[in-house]
Amino acid sequence: MAGKPDLRVVTVRHYDLELDYKPHSARLSGRAVLTAAGDGPFVLDFGPFHIAKVLVNGKPARYTHRAGKLRVQAAVRGEFTVEVRYSGKPQPVHTRHWGDLGWDELTDGAIVASQPFGAPSWFPCVDLVSQKATYRISMTAPSPYTVVCNGVLVDGHVGGSTTTWVYSSTEPMATYLASVQIGQYVEVAPRVFAPARLRRAAAFDFARQPRMIEVFSSLFGPYPFADYSVVITDDELEVPIEAQGLSTFGANHVDGRRGSERLVAHELAHQWFGNSVGIAAWEHIWLNEGFACYAEWLWSEASGGPTAEVMAARARTLLSVLPQDILIGSPAEEHWFDDRVYKRGALTLHALRVELGDDSFFSLLREWTSRHRHGTVTTEDFVSLAGHRDLLNRWLFAPKLP
Ligand SMILES: [Zn+2]
């Protein structure tokens, strides 16, 4: 990850990625043009690809590339562009706590699952959760494949054996949320893509998603992006993958009985909490996961299932028998994606809702999403907006369950 004090970190404002993927050989080649600002020489995060060329403001630049760092020797100042031409078989980013991240091959296609540090596995970037940029992603793949990326499909053309898909994200996005999904998919409902064998089950399981968007829009404020797409892979996935304007589920999350609707709600809620309102550092992760988990309970309540009160009581029982040794307001790195952060984060919101009453609680959530729309936040930002500091401190910054 970029950000060590001896390295110059620039601010990237726009990523223009022109890529070509061959599923059979798993080779990716492309050209990334980053519009950035800062003073050089500078460093980018980038996996072990073969680099053909690095150009700064259109002129060849000297660089070194090792251990996931692309150091560019160019005396830039202010706004500049850096173009990297590269090719190779994408290699996942190995991490201590979460295994391999980033670009991954499917049995027939590819997925991207970058959270939190996997983005350099497929494009050169400044891989900081605090930085957001706009994107244009053009992906060329063999014609039988469907390519789904973040944002809106703005262009596409069939070149015989290959098809090019061009997506534009005009709302700023963190690198870990940038995504490409490639597979032999059919559109089973508007912007819901699945393998043909799962057509009927997927159409049924996602049929209530438009209603879910209505419910969440009334509780959390307007849906923050131009589009929302869902991909269901032919392979099984351990957990669904959150991306901006896009969620990816495994074949195992579809059963034709809405058995995983809780996860459909969870991933959708991340569009407000995590994607539009992003976090300034990973230690604030409960602001994404606690909110998305609470949204599961709100959907349960809104769709005739157990109320949030019942769901909260169940979660509390579960947590009470687990070790109470982490601070969910600032967990250590190995606990960022600990289920206790999710559940206790949701319980924190439920406690606040009980304290404030529904009207004030939901207007607080709408104020939160509108004030920080497409921005980044910290836990302190939430506590100062919400008030009730003592209550929140007990939930967020003391190990013992209140
Ligand atoms: Zn989540």
Image (cartoon, rainbow, N blue to C red):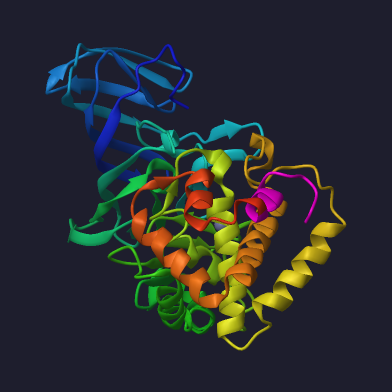
Describe residue 301's horizontal placement relative to residue 154 as left or right.
right
Nearer-the-camera pick, 71 or 29: 71
Residue 352, how many percent across, how many down? Answer: 61, 64
Query: Which quarter is ligand 1 in?
Result: bottom right
Nearer-the-camera pick, 195 or 390: 390
Asked if residue 296 is positioned above or below residue 104 in the image, the reply reads: below
Describe residue 289's horizontal placement relative to residue 244 as left or right.
right
> What residue appears at the point 44 percent right and 70 percent down from the top-left corner?
363
Regarding residue 256, the answer to whether it shows in the image is: no
Asked if residue 68 is positioned above or below residue 161 in the image, the reply reads: above
Residue 280, how many percent across, how many down? Answer: 45, 40
Nearer-the-camera pick, 15 or 137: 15
Residue 156, how many percent across, how many down? Answer: 19, 59
Nearer-the-camera pick, 401 or 269: 401
Describe residue 376's horizontal placement relative to residue 56 as left or right.
right
Residue 26, how many percent across, how many down? Answer: 43, 42
> What residue appears at the point 36 percent right and 67 percent down from the top-left corner?
228
Q: Is residue 396 magenta?
A: yes
Asked if residue 283 is positioned above or below residue 39 in the image, the reply reads: below
> What residue appears at the point 42 percent right and 59 percent down from the top-left corner?
368
Q: Is residue 340 magenta?
A: no
Q: Quadrant of the C terminus?
A: bottom right
Describe residue 388's horizontal placement relative to residue 224 as left or right.
right
Q: Which residues are magenta?
A: 391-402
